[in-house]
Structures are given as C-alpha cells and as structure tokens.
Image: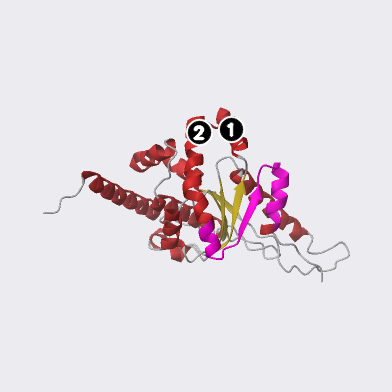
Amino acid sequence: MVTRCPLTWGLFLGSTAIVISLKRRQKQRLAVSPSPSSPSAGTAAESSCLSPSDTLPECEVVFVLGAPGTGKGTQCQLLQERLREDNNNNNNRDNDNDGQVLEVQSKTPFWKHLSAGDLLREERKSGGELGDLINSRIDAGELVPSSITVRLLENAMIKSHYESVSVPVSATSNSLSNECIRFLIDGFPRSQENIQAWEDTMKRHTVKFVLNFVCPEEVLVGRLLERGKDSGRSDDNLEVIRKRFKTHQISTVPILAYFHKKNIPLHTIDSAKGVEQVYDTVAPLLSSRPTVK
C-alpha cells in the first residue's frame, strides 16, 4: 500500500482551501449589484453568473520588474497620474483659439497601476487562513504561491474595469473611453512559477513589454532602511531585505531571459537616477501625442 508523506497531504489540503477561499471571494465581488444609473446595469443574480472572461475584455499589460527599492511603485503611480492628466490636457487642445480642428491620431492612454505586493498586503490585513499564509511568506522574505497572486491581480483588474465603465463619458467629449483595459503590473512576475500561473489563466491578455528597473544594491539597501522608518512594513528591515535581494537574484533575473526568448520587448531602466529623470525615460514608452493635420 502506498503511503503519503504528511507534509504532502498538508500542502495539498492547504492549496485546495486557498483556491476555494479565493473563488468564494470572487463570487461575492461579482455578485455586487451595479449602479442603477449605469446604462449597462444588470441584476445581482446576472452579475454573479458572469465569469472573469465575461466581465473583463482582453487587456494590455506591462510587467514592471526590479529588486526591492528600485522605485517601481513610485514610477507606476506617477505614470498613472500624469498620463491621465496628459490625456485631459490633450482633449482641451482638440480645438485651438482660431477654431482649427486638430486631428488626434492617438492620445495618451490611461494606464492603471496594480501592485502585486500591495494586493497581497491588503489581503493579509483581511485576516483569516489565507491572510495568515501570506503573512508568514512575506515576513520570511519568501514568495507567495503564484495561484494566489494571479487571482488577486485578476480580481483587481476586473474591479478596475467595472468601475471605469460605470463612469459615463460626455456625449460632446473627444476623450478616450473611460474603459480601463491597460495595466502596469508592479512586482510581478518574480519567478517561472508566476509566469506559468499567469499563462494558465491570463494568457489572452497582451504583454506589451517589460520594464526592468536596475540600481546598485548599496543604494537600494539605504532606500529601504529609510523607507522602513515610516512604512510600518515588517519586511523593511536589514535581515529580510538581504533575503529579498537573494530571492530576487535567484527567482526573478532568470525570467528576463524567458521574455527575451518569447520576443517580448524588455526595457532596462537605470533607477539610480532622480525620480524625474527616470520618469522622463519611461513615460515616452507608454504615451503617444496628438498630431495636427
């Protein structure tokens, strides 16, 4: 008779519980009744029957990679805020002072920032078995199971898209649609396992390119220790920082070769420079400008 290791059984049962918990939460979120003012509003019963592929169209994704402290989150937030602002400014310039009509070939698209780390931290604060599991992994400087991370990202994309299409666009506006279908995914993927989990469920979304932020390790350590004074994050201490660097080198760096092999463009960004200098390097990769005809 074949006997199974207690550890193997424990991992199997734990993974099963996690998947069930995540599916239950997703159903609860999709069951929320849409706003009555929305022209496409349906009933809660109809929403609860929708699958992610029904509620989320094909999206465009940029993966943002880099060791802890390289400024991924800072740059993604700036890109989200400023590129949307640029689009609004472009809309105001569609007609010049003389009434000349400007033909807008393509305006600055809106990119929504999603941080894999922030989503995990939010989940861990929610408590329960899943939150405890995420807590133990992050506190140890280890990676969280890929299936959890991908599901949290998917839920966040669905939520962002739903909220965006609930906002009506003015009939006289020349702006881009409010529809949120472009995402900057910060801190993911970090391993081949992450990539596999993404392709298992999210392959239909287009990976436009990959941003890889690089910076000398001594600079990053200083940044994270300084951040730890105010962040309250349990992983912003020297011991865990060193573990995170090691995890990054072992798990993340090799996946850059994977993207190269898949012919997905890879842009390496020197993030040792000032915030504005880095932004000026990255923004043109994501933005496009109106032209006059």
Q: Which residue is mark 1?
A: 227
- Residue contact at pointers 2 and 1, CB within 8 angstroms: yes
User: Residue 141: horizontal and vertical position, in percent?
Assistant: 45, 38
Mark 1: give few (<14), some (14-19) or many (20+) Cα within 10 Å: some
Vertical comparison of 186 with 126: above or below:
below
Residue that sits furthest to the bottom in the current view: 293
User: Residue 58: horizontal and vertical position, in percent?
Assistant: 52, 66
Alpha carbon distance from label 2 to label 1? 9 Å
- Decide which of tag 2 and tag 1 comes sooner along the chain: 1
Residue that sits furthest to the left in the current view: 1
User: Residue 123: horizontal and vertical position, in percent?
Assistant: 43, 43
Q: Residue at image x 64%, y 47%?
A: 75
- The residue stretch that appears in magenta: 257-284
Q: In terms of depth relative to the viewer, which is nearer, 241 or 19?
A: 241
Q: Which residue is mark 2?
A: 233
Mark 2: give few (<14), some (14-19) or many (20+) Cα within 10 Å: few
**Left or right of 285: which side holds 210?**
left
Q: Residue at image x 63%, y 63%?
A: 177
Kindly identify the amino acid type of the residue bearing the numbered disc 2. Arg
Residue that sits furthest to the top in the current view: 229
Please state, as top left, top right, bottom left or bottom right, where the C terminus lies in the image. bottom right
**Left or right of 106: which side holds 49?**
left
Does the magenta segment cover residue 270? yes
